[in-house]
Amino acid sequence: MTSINEIAEDYVARYVELDPQFATDLGVPGHDHELTDISLEGFAARNTLTASTLAAIRALEPADEHERVAKEAMEERLALAVECYEAGDDTSSLNVIASPLQSVRAVFDQMSTEGEENHANIAARLAAVPAALEQLKATLLDSAAQGRTSARRQVLACAKQTQDWNGERGGESFWAGLVTRTGATGAVREDLDRGAAAAGAATADFGRFLTEELLPSAPEKDAVGRERYQRASREFLGDTVDLEETYAWGLEEVARLRAEMALTASRIVPGGGLKDALAELDSDPARKISGADNFRAWMQDKSDAAVAELADVHFDIPDPVRRLECMIAPTHDGVMYYTPPSEDFTRPGRMWWSVPEGQTEFATWRETTTVYHEGVPGHHLQCAQTAYRKDLLNRWQRSMCWVSGHGEGWALYAERLMDDLGYLSDPGDKLGMLDGQMMRAVRVVVDLGMHLELEIPAGFDFGGGGGGGGGVDHAGERWTPELGWQFMTANVNTEEAQLAFELDRYLGWPGQAPAYKVGERIWLQARDDAKARKGAEFDLKTFHRQALDLGSIGLKPLREALGRL
């Protein structure tokens, strides 16, 4: 192989063979009956491929600007992947949202439940769950023996998740529900039922393993410390940032957003405060939708309208990208998320709403901005357009590279852009956007603060009263999970059950949560830099096209590539 793009294409093709679940994500056939090897040997095999590909990339000079961008992006990502593997981050990973445990369950969400071939693949993959979880047990125990175990909080929370998946704490078993959704009959239904029973039993056994075998080695302390945090921050940003400066900026963002929220609240209830505005919005029947199916239809209508109105005006949106499906997820985690299309677009991009158990009413003022975040011009436009650009991007750039700071930063940038374009002119929708921005700013503060145990500065209003401040003084104290919880509940207007999950998420997935706001900050800086370079020739639509045509890459390679345009 003599080109960067050839090496990139080969890397993806070989990686798919080592990671069947990734193959399913891409829509590559032939692997849907398998689960990824999460034994020590499986992790080692994937790292060996990554390290050899990195060496090959470093040995070549790019042929043109497109290959130069690809090389810079691959070097940054692959070098960091090898560094994280060698530090033991991969093989010790256990958290409530994005560790191998969750991936074993979540891969089934990407599988079609229609047709006998798909039924057979689901049955085979269900039957493979026990072996996969046994592999994960051995991997985690090996890491524990080397002193690398996730904190006690994560171990216990993951054990609860296994109970939820099995319906042991109320609700339907995920495994049984999956089989029911297939509608299969006859012999394949018997295979599916056996597979679901085996997966359920293995899930219950893994939950017991967590509490009885792994928990004794789990540290009480949640903070991961500076070395681990700095590596994680680079992983999620694709850039190195000054952690103390970012923390100080996060505090400033919280204060700025408080003021803007108070101003917006006064437009909803003249003379009232934030609490008054929230109560007014939540009691307004015109801002409520009853029933999950009706809410899904509302999301679809909102998304379709955004695509129709933004295409060819503010963005170039190719025809295949204009299709986005809004879905109700088979889980009940209380989050909205996006999954990209398959490589050939036969499976479209999808926006999922994981409805909390028992919730039947939905507040549109809270979620209008979320539709733009997950859909267009947010994740769907970014991810689906990247998948479409086969003429500009190699397969690794299109399908394998995802950097949270780039992707989540773009989605927050998209929300703010929609406000600038007038789509959030309704003060309720605007407050919903600001409330989401506040949560992301709070994330910067508590994630950095808790993991690095930073000091709360003098003069900072800790908050209280639903996000409006309150004069609570914790100056000089160092952040702990308990202070993080107080800060979140004082400044984020979300149900406590969801906030509890958020806190667990930050503590178990260091560096990821700040990537949203920090990524947005760098996207806005990149746009400002382009305006300064281009002057009167700057065109927003052209900037968006050129930026998205680079694919999802680290924020440092992004800034460097944009600077050359």
Image (cartoon, rainbow, N blue to C red):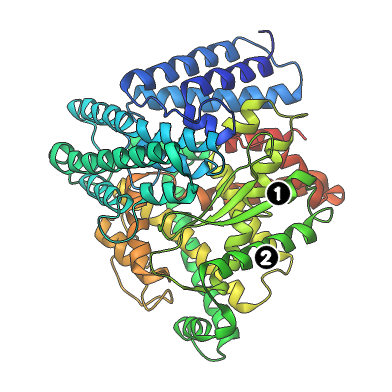
Q: Which residue is mark 2?
A: 302
Q: Residue at x 69, y 63 (%)?
A: 418
Q: Does residue 107 appear to the left or right of 131 in the view shown? A: right
Q: What crowding class fits label 1: few (fewer than 14 Cα within 10 Å), some (14-19), or many (20 or more)?
A: some
Q: Which residue is mark 1?
A: 527
Residue 331 in the image: above or below residue 563: below
Judged from this view, the residue extending furthest toward the front is 186
Residue 178 in the image: above or below residue 138: below
Q: Does residue 172 appear to the left or right of 327 in the view shown? A: left
Image spot of residue 209 (x, y percent): 18, 38
Looking at the rendered structure, the kind of residue marked 2 is Lys
Q: What secondary structure is marked by label 1?
A: helix
In the foreground, 342 or 68: 342
Q: What crowding class fits label 2: few (fewer than 14 Cα within 10 Å), some (14-19), or many (20 or more)?
A: some
In the foreground, 540 or 372: 372
In the foreground, 328 or 72: 328
Please give the count of numbered marks on the rendered protein. Answer: 2
Q: What secondary structure is marked by label 2?
A: helix
Q: Earlier in the sequence, mark 1 or mark 2?
A: 2
